[in-house]
Image (tube, rainbow, N blue to C red):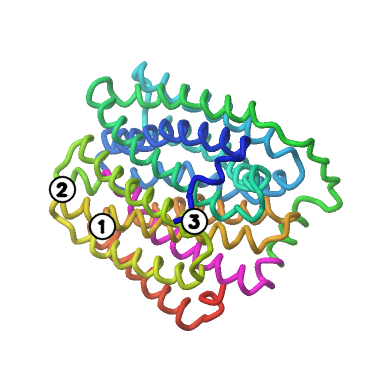
């Protein structure tokens, strides 16, 4: 079997991946603690969804501008600056919580600040990966990035559950702020050739229009972005509703909530490592079709779970299928896009995966859960995913041919 860690032989990618993975542990602690704190402050599934939407609305509004910036500036310096600002945002969240000044208003405002910074950080970071490895190893690097993300998703909620139980939610925010030290050390140790500044030959708005024309007129990219959109809007919100599932459906506390998130992470870790090991030995289009349909079907099964062990088992498989779907879409898009549009295409990807999915998907799912319960919210949206997957992969054969 090919070694899924072979891309770590590149010093720059090794520094980037190690620091990023360690920092993401803190990020997942904060994500878990924010959802739990929102539920404690409001006891409302709708407001839990609103907090998630607030962190993603700036991504929806500004990520395309962030992509234009990523195509014109030194991406490494941009990522360093944004990671520093994210550390300060986490520190502010810790201070408001530890001093007892936190309210739903402040929680939403700080979540929105995080989203604004992320609107510029995510496209730059996504586009930076190709500068850290050989182009032929891009798929493996993206899959390994996904494995680091899911390793953090396993470890972060587990640590977060213990920290909440022993020291309260504020400690999670403080530890996340400190965790950014790891990624900043790695980023400042990365050495890349000086990047020639791109002379802005067109206005930012014209650069966005150029991206839109490219996505509209390139059939393979157009089809992939539609899959990304449907599976982000209707697939990701189940994570937003996880504290509601834990507390109101399964009768679990913070530790049980962390366990559910960890199960998604363990499954995702295996999915990402398996994808990195497989490489390009199987047709990516057919693999994407299988992962997409399995992902949707598993979410429908999870929506009906009422026993903790069964919910955990389904979430293990769901995490695996979800990450294979996400990583394949990302890698296929990066293989197709020309370098001069890479930052902007990754900004469109971020807009959909982070912005649209949370602003519309999470808020819509939270509204459904508030009115009809989480079974309808998660199962109904998953049914939409399954229907679209059948249409996209059986009625649009160009996807399977990729």
Q: Nearer the viewer, residue 48 or 148?
A: 148
Mark positioned earlier in the residue sequence (3 or 2): 2
Give me the disc on residue 250: 2
Would you call the spot at circle 2 few (<14 residues within 10 Å), some (14-19), or many (20 or more)? Answer: some
Whole-angstrom CA distance, mark 3 to mark 2, is 30 Å
- Image position, residue 165 (x, y; %): 22, 26
Q: Is residue 3 left or right of residue 189?
A: left
Q: Nearer the viewer, mark 3 or mark 2?
A: 3
Contact? badges 3 and 2 (CB < 8 Å): no
- Considering every residue shown, the one lying at the far top of the view is 99
Kindly identify the residue that appears in the image at 45 percent across and 58 percent down. Answer: 232
Magenta segment: 214-243
Whole-angstrom CA distance, mark 2 to mark 1, is 19 Å
Our reading of the magenta stretch's main secondary structure is helix
Give me the disc on residue 327: 3
The vertical placement of 87 against 269, above or below, is above
Q: Mark 1 points at which residue?
A: 371
The vertical placement of 183 against 129, above or below, is above
User: Residue 108: in sight, yes or no?
Assistant: yes
Residue 77 on the magenta span: no
- Image position, residue 368 (x, y; %): 30, 58
Kindly identify the residue that appears in the image at 46 percent across and 26 percent down. Answer: 179
Q: Which of 326 and 148 is in front in this view?
A: 148
Label 3 residue SS: helix
User: Residue 62: in sight, yes or no?
Assistant: no
């Amino acid at each position: 079997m090919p070694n899924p860690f072979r891309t770590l032989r590149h010093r720059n990618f090794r520094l980037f991946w190690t620091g990023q993975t360690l920092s993401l542990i803190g990020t997942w602690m904060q994500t878990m603690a924010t959802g739990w704190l929102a539920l404690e402050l409001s006891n409302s599934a709708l407001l839990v969804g609103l907090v998630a939407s607030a962190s993603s609305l700036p991504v929806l509004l500004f990520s395309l501008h962030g992509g234009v910036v990523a195509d014109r500036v030194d991406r490494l310096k941009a990522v360093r600056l944004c990671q520093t600002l994210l550390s300060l945002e986490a520190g502010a969240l810790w201070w408001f919580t530890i001093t007892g000044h936190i309210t739903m208003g402040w929680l939403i405002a700080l979540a929105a600040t995080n989203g604004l910074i992320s609107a510029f950080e995510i496209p730059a970071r996504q586009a930076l990966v190709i500068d850290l490895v050989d182009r032929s190893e891009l798929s493996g690097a993206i899959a390994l990035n996904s494995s680091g993300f899911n390793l953090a998703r396993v470890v972060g909620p587990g640590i977060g559950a213990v920290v909440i139980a022993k020291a309260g939610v504020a400690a999670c925010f403080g530890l996340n702020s400190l965790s950014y030290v790891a990624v900043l050390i790695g980023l400042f140790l990365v050495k890349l050739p000086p990047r020639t500044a791109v002379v802005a030959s067109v206005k930012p708005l014209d650069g966005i229009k150029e991206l839109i024309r490219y996505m509209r007129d390139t059939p393979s990219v157009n089809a992939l972005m539609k899959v990304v959109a449907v599976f982000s809007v209707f697939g990701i919100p189940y994570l937003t509703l996880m504290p509601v599932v834990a507390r109101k459906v399964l009768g679990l506390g913070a530790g049980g909530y962390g366990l559910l998130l960890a199960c998604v992470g363990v499954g995702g870790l295996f999915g990402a490592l398996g994808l990195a090991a497989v490489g390009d030995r199987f047709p990516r289009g057919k693999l994407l079709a299988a992962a997409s349909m399995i992902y949707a079907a598993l979410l429908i099964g999870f929506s009906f779970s009422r026993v903790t062990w069964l919910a955990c088992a389904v979430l293990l498989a769901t995490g695996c299928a979800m990450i294979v779907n996400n990583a394949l879409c990302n890698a296929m898009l990066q293989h197709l896009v020309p370098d001069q549009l890479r930052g902007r295409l990754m900004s469109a990807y971020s807009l959909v995966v982070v912005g649209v999915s949370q602003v519309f998907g999470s808020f819509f799912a939270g509204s459904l859960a508030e009115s009809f319960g989480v079974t309808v919210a998660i199962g109904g949206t998953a049914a939409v995913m399954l229907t679209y997957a059948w249409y996209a992969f059986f009625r649009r054969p160009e996807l399977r041919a990729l």
